Image: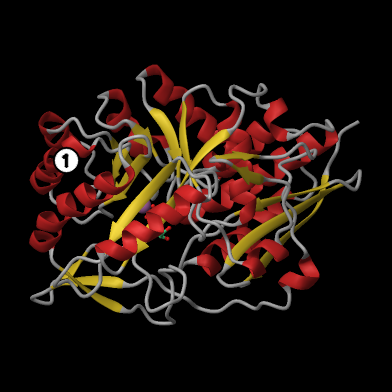
Amino acid sequence: METKIIDARVIVTCPGRNFVTLKITTTDGVYGVGDGTLNGRELAVAAYLQEHVVPCLIGRDADRIEDTWQYLYRGAYWRRGPVTMAAIAAVDTALWDIKAKRANMPLYQLLGGKCREGVTVYTHANGHDIAQLLDSVSHHIELGYKAVRVQCAVPGVADAYGIPHGDKPYEPADASIPREEVWSTPKYLRFAPKMMEAVRAKVGFDVALLHDAHHRLTPIEAAALGKSLEEFRLFWLEDVTPAENQEAFQLVRQHTTTPLAVGEVFNSIFDCQQLISERLIDYVRASVAHAGGITHMRRIASFAELYGVKTGCHGPTDVSPICMGAALHFGLSVPNFGIQEHMPHCAETDEVFPHAYTFNDGYMQPGEQPGHGVDIDEKLAARFPYKRMYLPVARLEDGTLFNW
Ligand code: EZ4
Ligand code: CO
């Protein structure tokens, strides 16, 4: 018998930061949840879902996930874009959750079963200076992480990317109107190898180290940075240059053997088509919540597999635990998995989104609950109303608006 969608509800909550959740319920009483959070533009996705997607979902067959994906993607006429694709992701993730619950299986089983024993994750270490960074790296290695992203304030630069303000945990979307930061590429390029040298001297070469340049370099600067870091054997260097311009990576690639990761802002396979088919990157960073859900992420991963490119999904605190859970099922089941980012959520977020996933000794497990294993406590969610919170913007020292 056909299982129809009878209800779809958009839930916006701010337990520490804003999240957009879609909860879909079917005629047999099963429900599923999906994440459509888009940092700083949350209400655009919520309205897109509420006004333009929910009315089309009611009455549809909940089992037809691919058909619903095509219906929302092609049916809008206006393809791609972060808002549309986050909305489609929320629907898609909720429908996979429902299908797996109805099959009484953890989602990874429906996706083909385990390809590995656990999902290797990396986390973030940072410091206002090198000494603080070294402590942070050691602390995370003690927690069991086998891969650590390192970011450090640059001497003489007021605000490097990835560094907390004061003693609060790092959370970039921290103001109701964007904070303005000042950035200097030359100072950063001189400092980055010194930072990496200090970390390798402290922890040796057995720990995987990553670093995020956060879209701030030109291709030739990126090439120089990649070269200057080669001796430190990074696991990856991330987002060296904005990737709307995919061919820019040809120049970077010609000059350095440092592995490259790109794509946390991508929302479709077309954003990385050239990067993958020309083997210009090593890891693609698209996430379930931003790139059309499980359905589209599987397509991206399959395409990447043809060219030896691996997954390295974005997993910051600005995607909800629902995205994290879905990403772990995806990561466990996809053959060309590389690594998964893991930025632990704050206690309030974890309480609003009860989840089956666990971390142990550098690996995460999605858990064995039917579905993707993440839920939302709606009563608790209602106690944390939406708060407008924006990412900062960056300016160069002469005042030019730059890439944050
Ligand atoms: O700045 O998710 O690799 N991780 C990152 C993130 C992004 C935020 C933006 O919303 O670059 O911290
Ligand atoms: Co990044």
Q: Nearer the viewer, residue 346 or 270?
A: 346
Residue at 33 percent across and 79 percent down: it is 179
> Residue drawn at (21%, 54%), measured in percent from left and top?
195
Q: Nearer the viewer, residue 323 or 338?
A: 338
Image coordinates of residue 285 in percent, x first then y, are 41, 41
Picture coordinates of residue 48 (x, y %)? 57, 60
Q: Nearer the viewer, residue 60 or 285?
A: 285
**Relative horizontal placement of residue 22, taking residue 295 as reference (left or right):** right
Going 41% across and 35% down the picture, which residue do you hit?
269
Tell me if I can see residue 241 in this picture.
Answer: no
Regarding mark 1 in the picture, which secondary structure is present there? helix
Query: In the image, residue 122 lies at what x, y percent?
Result: 45, 45
x and y, in percent, of residue 24 in the image: 76, 51
Instruction: Name, please, the residue furthest toward the top.
Output: 306
Image quarter of the C terminus: bottom left
Pick the front one: 277 or 340: 340
Residue at numbered disc 1 = 226
- Please state if 162 lies on the left or on the right of 76 as rendered: left
Quarter holding the N terminus is top right
The residue type indicated by label 1 comes to Gly
